[in-house]
């Protein structure tokens, strides 16, 4: 593929600055857990289902401990204490709590050592379950390899999981490698995860564990039929980042949207809550072998893509370092960016090539995710298709890894069956037709493309220096990313941030750190 | 350019689609049918076009999309012209403005930010519509009111009691109050909406706010009937609401108006 030679020293500086930016956030949030993290521990301990009012049992248990002012210890030791005292499983414990038959805070303490050990055993069992799903994926990938890159990624969004299944299988048979089930609008703001199979949603389908299972099973069937493993994607963003990560780990999802700042900027979720939640959710992603997708592409929907390319890059560096601290390897960090420059601008295609080349060069081992044009699409579906064709070409030319297939009807409605077909066909055509185009070309020094790439990297470094000086919280308050301003204490879900007590234990986190050799405040060094 | 003069093209106000010739009535269609690819599928597609009143239906492409689904591209001819003089066009009560024009209207005519308070009131937990209109992210590529420098947005979220909404509107000196109602069991949304108007009137600031209702069951006519200034139903984009508020608030509280609030 076509290559851009980056200024090594500048890139190293960007990495150092971002690592420091991220470390600062970690230090300031290390003393806290969140209701969502504790609910995901409860889930991983086997607590599932809902009570008679439809409230998920992980919420019931966490709210119960919170009311007794015990949540700062973490849910794990209290569940372990109940198991030891009563000989129950965590699921049975939750059931009794939900029926009002058991008060966890009034149980006799079974001894710190014994409880911690039980908690660790429960965590070990949970991680074994996730590890088994990871190994299952590895062997499926070996048996059913995905032969070509970029992987073609398409979205289904009917609101009805059974209808989604039909469309997903059809898309896979047409050539899609990755299927994302878009969530119902507004799910990110629910402070619980809906339960069971769902058949109604607004602009998408609820992310529930049962919906995950149904879709994964259908795609496994289709993968075997096609001889190619079809990856499944869902969204870790919102108030339930870690819980969705836990569900995805259990149901063998392959990719998860997981951005360290998306919820803050675009969903007005509290910044501290988001930074704490993303850390644990990404650890679960790392352990499950999930490839995360970051959402920098969204920035270019609120600010002009021509003038703001550097904010995408700076955010990628920051997202990357957050991810590394959670134990994700480069191969699992799908940094997002997009083709969104106004097509009316002269040389816009060259500028798109410059950005795509630069991202590829900055993160050579990351499966970078390239998002299609959306902002400048209207109801003119024919021009939209032409724009997507250019996007497809740039993607292949610059060696992108994950290619979200653009839809000609983007600005009109969720894709019709024939829209997905036409778009996948166009993308497949370019993947074949331009396969070795990149390796036939050399970038001319100081050409439009070369100059633009160099300029973007310089601006990105400036921006990171500025963020380093201010700190990330302050930078977000000033609207550095996507032009959106959010205060540190504002936004939704801050009441779900809990100060850890001196007895706090999260055995899942401990074990993942141990197994992936991730120490707090340090990055995994085997990059 | 060759061709006929414009007057002749419209032929006394009767028009047909123009494909390649004047009045050829040619229409291009594409659709998918849940049928297998083959002669039966093609005939089904032609029948679909006949039901659209297309004569001489032609299938130029039929592609299987997967088991039991086929995609068709077809052509046919319309023969019944449209008589322009007989058409009625509903005119909106305000103009839809482009984002820049919205910002300019607010800046030049009001000279300050428009303060908007929004909530899904009563028992309603649905904030999808409200968030789409207010939050930065917006909806379908159209950014919410937060994205405009001319709006200061207070989004109170869901299940907000009418009393709390009224209280907040007073506190922040709201220029506009947006109420979202989705749940409609037993027409609870109607009594909720009416109750809010009564509360605002009781507090004596009904004439100082633009009161807007929105939701899948809301129409402009219904909103007016309930005592609101405007109603927005399904398909509303943030830009529609922004256009309306920019014009309505500026009209009422313009820098150049003598009315004092």
Image (cartoon, coloured by chain):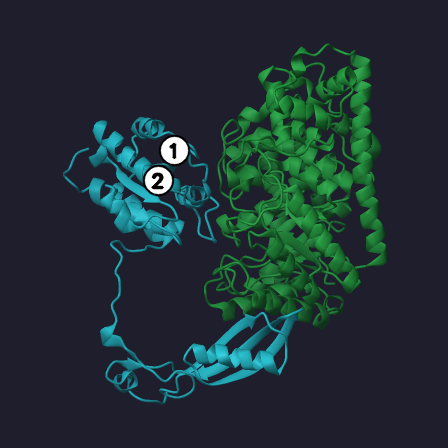
Chain colours: A green, B cyan
In front: B62, or A233?
A: B62
Task: Tell me whether marks 1 and 2 sit on the same chain.
Answer: yes
Near mark 2 (Cα within 10 A), the count class, few <14, some 14-19 or many ≥20, is many
- Does residue A456 sit above or below A411 in this rendering? above
Tell me what residue is drawn at x 75 percent, y 27 percent: A520
Q: Circle 2 marks a residue in which chain?
A: B
Q: Would residue B6 be visible to someone looking at this image? A: yes
Say which quadrant the C terminus of chain A sits in: top right
Percent position (x, y) of residue A154?
63, 58
Q: Give the number of the disc on residue A198.
A: none
Say which quadrant the N terminus of chain A sits in: bottom right
In front: B185, or A18?
A: B185
Determine which quarter of the picture holds residue A284: top right
State which tag comes first along the sequence, 1 or 2.
Answer: 1
In front: A328, or B30?
A: B30
Percent position (x, y) of residue A145?
81, 59
Do the residues under discs 1 and 2 have CB atoms within 8 angstroms?
A: yes
Q: Give the number of the disc on residue B122.
A: 1
Percent position (x, y) of residue B121?
38, 35
The CA span between labels 1 and 2 is 8 Å
Circle 2 residue: B189
Tell me what residue is drawn at x 44 percent, y 48 percent: B143
Q: Relative to residue A112, is residue A480 drawn left or right?
A: left
Tally the marks.
2
- Does residue B184 sit above or below A399 in this rendering? above
Q: Would residue A17 be visible to someone looking at this image? A: no
Q: Circle 1 marks a residue in which chain?
A: B
- Does residue A302 sit above or below A230 in this rendering? above
Question: Considering the numbered disc 2 on the image, is that residue within a helix, a strand or a loop?
Answer: helix
Question: Considering the numbered disc 1 on the image, is that residue within a helix, a strand or a loop?
Answer: loop
């Amino acid at each position: 593929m076509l290559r851009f030679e980056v200024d090594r020293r500048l890139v190293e500086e960007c990495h150092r600055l971002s690592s420091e930016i991220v470390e600062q956030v970690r230090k300031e949030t290390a003393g806290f857990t969140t209701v969502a993290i504790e609910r995901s521990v409860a889930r991983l301990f086997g607590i599932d289902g809902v009570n008679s009012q439809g409230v998920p049992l992980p919420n019931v248990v966490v709210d119960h401990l919170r009311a007794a002012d015990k949540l700062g210890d973490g849910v794990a030791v209290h569940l372990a204490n109940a198991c030891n005292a009563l000989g129950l499983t965590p699921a049975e414990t939750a059931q009794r709590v939900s029926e009002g038959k058991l008060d966890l805070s009034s149980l006799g303490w079974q001894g710190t050592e014994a409880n911690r050990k039980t908690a660790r055993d429960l965590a070990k069992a949970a991680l074994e379950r996730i590890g088994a799903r990871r190994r299952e994926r590895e062997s499926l990938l070996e048996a059913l390899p995905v032969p070509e890159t970029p992987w073609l990624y398409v979205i289904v969004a009917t609101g009805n999981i059974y209808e989604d299944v039909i469309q997903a299988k059809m898309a896979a048979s047409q050539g899609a490698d990755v299927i994302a089930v878009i969530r119902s609008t507004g799910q990110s703001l629910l402070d619980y995860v809906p339960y069971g199979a769902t058949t109604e949603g607004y602009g998408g389908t609820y992310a529930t564990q049962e919906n995950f299972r149904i879709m994964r099973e259908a795609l496994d069937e289709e993968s075997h039929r096609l001889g190619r493993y079809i990856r499944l994607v869902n969204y870790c963003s919102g108030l339930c980042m870690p819980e969705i990560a836990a569900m995805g780990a259990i149901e063998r999802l392959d990719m998860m949207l997981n951005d360290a700042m998306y919820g803050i900027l675009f969903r007005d979720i509290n910044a501290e809550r988001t930074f704490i939640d993303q850390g644990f959710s990404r650890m679960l992603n790392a352990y499950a072998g999930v490839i995360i997708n970051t959402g920098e592409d969204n920035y270019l929907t609120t600010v002009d893509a021509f003038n703001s390319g550097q904010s995408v890059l700076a955010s990628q560096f920051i997202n990357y370092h957050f991810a590394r601290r959670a134990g994700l390897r480069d191969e699992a960090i799908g940094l997002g960016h997009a083709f969104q420059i106004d097509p009316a601008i002269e040389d816009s295609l060259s500028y798109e090539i410059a950005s795509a080349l630069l991202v590829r060069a900055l993160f050579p081992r990351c499966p970078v995710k390239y998002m299609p044009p959306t902002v400048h699409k209207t109801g003119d579906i024919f021009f939209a298709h032409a724009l997507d064709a250019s996007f497809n070409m740039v993607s292949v030319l610059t060696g992108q890894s994950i290619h979200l297939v653009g839809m000609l009807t983007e600005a009109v409605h969720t894709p019709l069956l024939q829209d997905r077909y036409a778009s996948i066909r166009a993308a497949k055509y370019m993947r074949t037709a331009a396969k070795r185009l990149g390796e036939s070309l050399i970038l001319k020094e100081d050409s439009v493309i070369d100059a633009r790439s160099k300029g973007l990297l310089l601006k990105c470094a400036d921006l990171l220096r500025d963020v380093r000086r201010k700190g990330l919280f302050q930078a977000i308050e000033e609207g550095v990313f996507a032009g959106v301003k959010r205060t540190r204490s504002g936004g939704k879900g801050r009441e779900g941030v809990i100060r850890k007590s001196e007895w706090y234990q999260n055995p899942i986190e401990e074990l993942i750190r141990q197994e992936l050799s991730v120490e707090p405040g340090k990055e995994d060094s085997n990059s | 350019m060759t061709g006929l003069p414009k007057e002749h093209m419209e032929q006394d106000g009767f028009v047909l689609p123009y494909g390649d010739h004047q009045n050829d009535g040619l229409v291009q269609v594409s659709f998918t049918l849940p049928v297998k690819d083959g002669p039966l599928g093609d005939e089904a597609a032609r029948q679909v076009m006949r039901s659209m009143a297309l004569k001489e239906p032609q299938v130029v492409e039929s592609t299987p999309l997967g088991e039991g689904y086929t995609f068709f591209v077809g052509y046919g001819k319309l023969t019944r012209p449209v008589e322009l003089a007989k058409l009625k066009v509903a005119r909106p009560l305000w103009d839809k403005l482009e984002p820049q024009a919205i910002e300019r209207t607010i800046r030049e005519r009001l000279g300050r930010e428009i303060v908007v308070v929004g909530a899904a009131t009563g028992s309603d937990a649905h904030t999808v519509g409200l968030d789409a209109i207010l939050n930065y992210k917006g909806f379908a590529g159209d950014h919410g009111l937060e994205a405009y420098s001319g709006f200061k947005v207070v989004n109170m979220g869901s299940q907000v009691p009418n009393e709390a909404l009224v209280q907040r509107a007073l506190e922040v000196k709201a220029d506009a109050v947006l109420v979202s109602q989705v749940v409609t069991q037993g027409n609870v949304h109607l009594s909720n909406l009416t109750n809010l108007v009564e509360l605002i009137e009781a507090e004596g600031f009904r004439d100082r706010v633009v009161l807007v209702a929105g939701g899948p069951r809301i129409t402009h006519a219904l909103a007016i009937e309930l005592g609101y200034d405007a109603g927005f139903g399904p398909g509303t984009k943030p830009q529609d609401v922004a256009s309306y508020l920019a014009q309505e608030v500026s009209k009422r509280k313009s820098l150049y108006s003598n009315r004092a609030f």
